[in-house]
Image (spheres, helix red, strand yellow):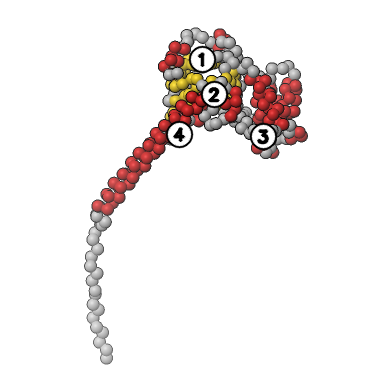
């Protein structure tokens, strides 16, 4: 489906998130630019209008990881759009697979208590903290500072925290450990909980980097290229189009680097030619031939 067909989804500017069904996401003429460093910017969303219905499971395919991350960061509320309106009905999770707001000097329990105070829905916070403690299975380490955790222990805590709260919309960049198909009790428990959490909820998951998570849960995909949606449909078709877009982007990047390299070579060659043509002693007084001063012979006698 061509991106021009999505222009029909343009909404009245008076619409607000409270008008939407919980889990519905609306991009209304949204623009977003990200910095690539060196004064360069990338337009990841260009006057984009799109409606994601509540309960949809959408796999996001893009030509670059910067595009996927910016799209999902905006959906999670981590970044502001540069133009237009992004409306989310209900609550949206933080971007799963990104850096979580964890403090290394605090214990696992203290970090859990902080997130429960922000996202918790029960009056008894200890109920959700205890759920996190049991799910991550860290034992007494749950009361140790995160700076003492191994990477595996941190991943288990992050997984438990991601599953501790119920949201209406789940943006997912990646789900660490999901590609592991081994029969691990912890991951089997995580999968069952994910099934429960996503039931009837809206999911938008990055799928460009062969993430099994998106392929396992999503039944529809969208392809983002040059700030627009160029296709919305089957996952197989999206994967093919995304690979073509990625290949085209790499080719453009290679061509740009080659042109820059060629320009540098021409500049260097011109500089060398100028140096070789310039007289070495230009502006300097030419050295005079050495003169021998004869001393008068001494008389002996």
CA distance separating discs 3 and 2: 24 Å
Q: Is residue 244 visible?
A: yes
Please name the residue shown 39% across and 39% down the image. 257
Q: Position of residue 151 (x, y in %)?
A: 65, 37
Label 3: element kind: loop
Q: Which residue is mark 3?
A: 182
Q: Quadrant of the N terminus?
A: top left
Q: Position of residue 297 (x, y in %)?
A: 24, 83
Nearest to N terminus: mark 3 or mark 4 = 4
Which of the two discs, 2 and 1, sits closer to the camera? 2
Q: Are marks 1 and 4 in contact (CB under 8 Å)?
A: no
Q: Is residue 40 visible?
A: no
CA distance separating discs 1 and 3: 37 Å
Q: For this rendering, which residue is in front, 278 or 148?
A: 148
Q: How many residues crowd around disc 2 within 10 Å: few (fewer than 14), some, or many (20 or more)?
A: many
Nearest to N terminus: mark 1 or mark 3 = 1
Please name the residue shown 36% across and 42% down the image. 261
Left or right relative to 54: residue 274? left
Q: Are marks 2 and 1 in contact (CB under 8 Å)?
A: no
Please name the residue shown 23% across and 61% down the image. 286
Q: How many residues crowd around disc 4 within 10 Å: few (fewer than 14), some, or many (20 or more)?
A: few
Q: Which residue is mark 2?
A: 59
Q: Which residue is mark 4?
A: 37
Q: How many residues crowd around disc 1 within 10 Å: few (fewer than 14), some, or many (20 or more)?
A: some
Q: For this rendering, which residue is in front, 118 or 212?
A: 212
CA distance separating discs 2 and 1: 14 Å
Please name the residue shown 51% across and 15% down the image. 51
């Amino acid at each position: 489906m061509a991106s021009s067909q999505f222009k029909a989804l343009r909404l009245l500017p008076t619409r607000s998130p409270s008008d939407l069904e919980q889990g519905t996401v609306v991009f209304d003429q949204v623009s977003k630019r990200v910095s690539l460093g060196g004064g360069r910017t990338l337009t990841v969303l260009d006057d984009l209008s799109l409606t994601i219905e509540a309960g949809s499971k959408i796999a996001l395919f893009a030509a670059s990881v910067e595009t996927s991350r910016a799209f999902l960061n905006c959906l999670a509320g981590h970044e502001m759009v540069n133009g237009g309106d992004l409306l989310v009905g209900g609550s949206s999770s933080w971007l799963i697979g990104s850096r979580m707001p964890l403090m290394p000097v605090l214990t696992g329990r203290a970090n859990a208590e902080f997130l429960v105070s922000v996202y918790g829905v029960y009056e008894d916070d200890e109920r959700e903290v205890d759920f996190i403690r049991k799910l991550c299975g860290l034992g007494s380490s749950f009361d140790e500072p995160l700076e003492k955790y191994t990477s595996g222990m941190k991943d288990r805590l992050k997984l438990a925290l991601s599953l501790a709260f119920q949201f209406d919309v789940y943006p997912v960049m990646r789900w660490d450990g999901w590609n592991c198909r081994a029969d691990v009790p912890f991951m089997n428990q995580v999968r069952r909980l994910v099934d429960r959490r996503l039931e009837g909820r809206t999911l938008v998951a990055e799928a460009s980097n062969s993430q099994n998570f998106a392929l396992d849960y999503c039944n529809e995909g969208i392809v983002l290229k040059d700030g627009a949606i160029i296709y919305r449909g089957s996952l197989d078709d999206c994967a093919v189009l995304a690979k073509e877009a990625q290949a085209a982007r790499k080719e453009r990047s290679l061509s740009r680097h080659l042109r820059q390299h060629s320009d540098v070579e021409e500049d260097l060659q011109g500089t060398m030619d100028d140096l070789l043509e310039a007289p070495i002693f230009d502006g300097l007084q030419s050295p005079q031939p050495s003169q021998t001063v004869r001393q008068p012979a001494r008389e002996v006698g």
